[in-house]
Image (cartoon, rainbow, N blue to C red):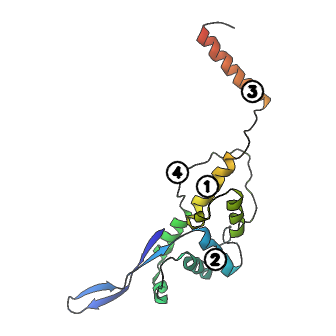
Amino acid sequence: MLKLTILGDEHFDDETSLFVTRGDVILELEHSLVSLSKWEASFEKPFLGKDEKTDEETFGYILAMLQTPDVPPEVFSRITAENIQEINNYIDSKMSATWFKEAKGMSTSREVITAELVYYWMIALNIPLEWERRHLNQLFTLIKVLNEKNQPEKKLSKAEIAARNRALNAQRKEQHNTSG
């Protein structure tokens, strides 16, 4: 969860002769499948993808991620460019120590990913529904791990078998001090 402090209004305090900020608000935001689903229901198009979001769509996603109840509307007019950058960094963060070795020549899927497709993956992989509230990138990592672990073991090609046998033979020759 991202906790974002939106600064209040700045006023001049006549008694202290200083500028003071009043009305700071802490917004709690969660980038999750629930947020994604809310946004897609509102805008009726996929959120994930390469298309740039309009200001209205970006603001809509901030509202979809919002966990803080009863936020006064004027708070949103005080969101700064730095706040937006912090939100984007949070959305883009990996949120996992897991990494994947990408196979050469593997193409990426061109399938359009929507909330319903992710729910399908969760059901097909028996992922508990509680994961819909976790950071979306953690859910995607779990889905990818489950997919990789459920794949049948890859068979070696004839060239890979021959290379493995050569290495084993060389190791055994050295181990037993023989020439073959």
Left or right of 74 in this view: 51: right
- Spatial separation of the CA atoms under disc 4 and disc 3: 33 Å
Query: Could you tell me the amino acid type at mark 4?
Result: Ala
> What residue is shown with label 1?
142
* Mark sitting earlier along the chain (4/2): 2
> What residue is shown with label 3?
161
* Mark sitting earlier along the chain (4/3): 4
At a point 60% along the width and 66% down the height, the residue shown is 132
Q: Are circles 4 and 3 on residues that touch, CB within 8 Å?
A: no
- Spatial separation of the CA atoms under disc 1 and disc 4: 11 Å
Q: Are circles 4 and 2 on residues that touch, CB within 8 Å?
A: no
Image x and y of residue 90, in percent: 51, 66
- Toward which corner of the image does residue 42 lie, by quadrant? bottom right
* Mark sitting earlier along the chain (1/4): 4
Q: Are circles 1 and 4 on residues that touch, CB within 8 Å?
A: no
* Mark sitting earlier along the chain (1/3): 1
> What residue is shown with label 4?
97
Q: Is disc 2 surrounded by few (<14), some (14 to 19) or many (20+) residues within 10 Å?
A: many
Residue 39's tag is 2
Query: Could you tell me the amino acid type at mark 1?
Result: Leu
* Mark sitting earlier along the chain (2/1): 2
At a point 67% along the width and 57% down the height, the residue shown is 126
Question: Comparing marks 1 and 3, which lies closer to the viewer?
Answer: 1
